Image (cartoon, rainbow, N blue to C red):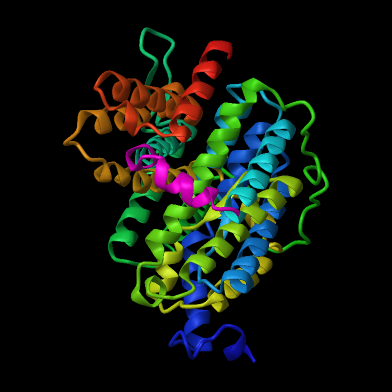
Amino acid sequence: MVYRLFKLSENQSSIPQEIMAGITTFLTMSYIIFVNPSILQSTGMDFGAVYVATCLVTILGCLLMAFMANYPIAVAPAMGLNVFFTYTVVQTLGYSWQNALGIVFISGMIFLLLVATRIRQWIIEYLPENISVGTAAGIGLFITLIALENANIIVRSPGKTLIMAGHLASLPSLLFFIGFFIIAILDYYKIKGAIIIAILITTIISLILGLSHFHGIFAVPPSIKPTLFSLRIGQILNLKDLPVLFTFLLVGFFDATGTLIGVLRQPLFRLDPLRSKRLSRALIADSIATTAGSLIGTASTSTYIESAAGIEAGGRTGLTSLTISILFLVLLFVSPLAQAVPPFAVAPALAYVGLLMLRNIGHISVNDPIEFIPAIIIVIMIPFTFSIADGLGMGLITFVILKIFTGKIKQLNPILWLLAVVFILYFIYS
């Protein structure tokens, strides 16, 4: 029955092979159960409720991916968008986390609409690659900046400079560097679960040194009530919210699409006659997970690039995703362990993921200044303004202006005109 359901024979796979692939992907991405609650609790959200929401939405996303698309792809809360949710939308722009969840809900519904129509293909074709690549790299730099601040490696300067080095000889700072180098070295040797291993080792050291407290490993899952159905929608439907909505939508959309295209490069997936239909179903699974996540208490979800590790280990079908969902179900019962993890143990994971995302800058074409300059503006301005929306908006407006004044106005499409106008109005009225 399992062989027929997931078409294992047609995909040249077996049950043990798929289970091992699921375990491999799980080990490379399970850091999200520590990182996501740690980030979102900075908005005032309950740590335990977000922990449960993170597990539940990952279980749902992976199940949908398994049975709708039959792909070995994991879906979980998106790194980058959870940072945007916390540090830009809530802490900088002043939204309540309830209103921010409302925007995530709307973006998920629009995402679902786009995927269900041909608009998805239209957007993919019309948004320049340098803009999407620059956004990914800028988010990576932003995440790294957040990680360094959380570990007190850099601090706000009371003098003339904006930031300065923190007390690098402090125990939390030293533990950050230990965690970071553990991840880098283990990753170099292709050891699966490098990030989760580093988090656990750093946490154990901090417990020994008395920098954090141990409350056990297993427990009944915390209550999700503090965040369940807490989103607010009625108070956010106005012009100033559009750039925030567009940012959630565009970043989530291209993150998911780019990951799927990038991970599913093997001929088995690339030459599949049902490829287009399965990709659409995979994106539908992601959009449903995003919408559901906003209802129970977490920011946007996305397909995970870490799925490549599972595919490398032999994952070919949705049975890999089903395995991941079962393992996250087990994680529901280890919330005390997650609460023992200090911020400086999570920070190395954030920094490393951010640096991996920054590698995208290598895909930006440097031959044409009109393509190169807007992308670099996005990369620079996202961390400098502490806002993905501001950086993306500045880059898009720059791109449109350069096209107009270099005689290439005909290369601008309706999507670019619309986004440029929206961001101009945003900068004027914000």
Of residue 17 and residue 262, the one placed in the foreground of this image is 262
State the residue at coordinates (66%, 64%): 59
* Residue 164 position by quadrant: top left
Q: Which residues are magenta?
A: 117-132
**Where, by quadrant of the figure, is residue 152 drawn?**
top left
Instruction: Find out whether residue 284 is within the magenta segment.
Output: no
Can the viewer see residue 387 in this picture? no
Q: Position of residue 82 (x, y in %)?
A: 57, 41
Q: Is residue 131 visible?
A: yes
Question: Which residue is pictured at 57% across the width and 78% down the height?
Answer: 319
**Relative image position of residue 196 (x, y in whole percent):** 48, 59
Give the image location of residue 47, x and y in percent.
Answer: 69, 44
244 left or right of 370? right
Q: Considering only vertical position in the picture, is 6 above or below 26? A: below
Residue 208, placed above or below residue 280: above
Assign the C terminus to one quadrant of the image.
top right
Query: In this view, which residue lies farthest toward the top?
Result: 160
- The secondary structure making up most of the magenta span is helix
Residue sitting nearer the eye, 399 or 226: 399
Q: Nearer the viewer, residue 248 or 74?
A: 248
**Percent position of residue 184, x then y:** 32, 54
Q: Quadrant of the N terminus?
A: bottom right
130 part of magenta stretch = yes
In screen coordinates, is 326 left or right of 184? Answer: right
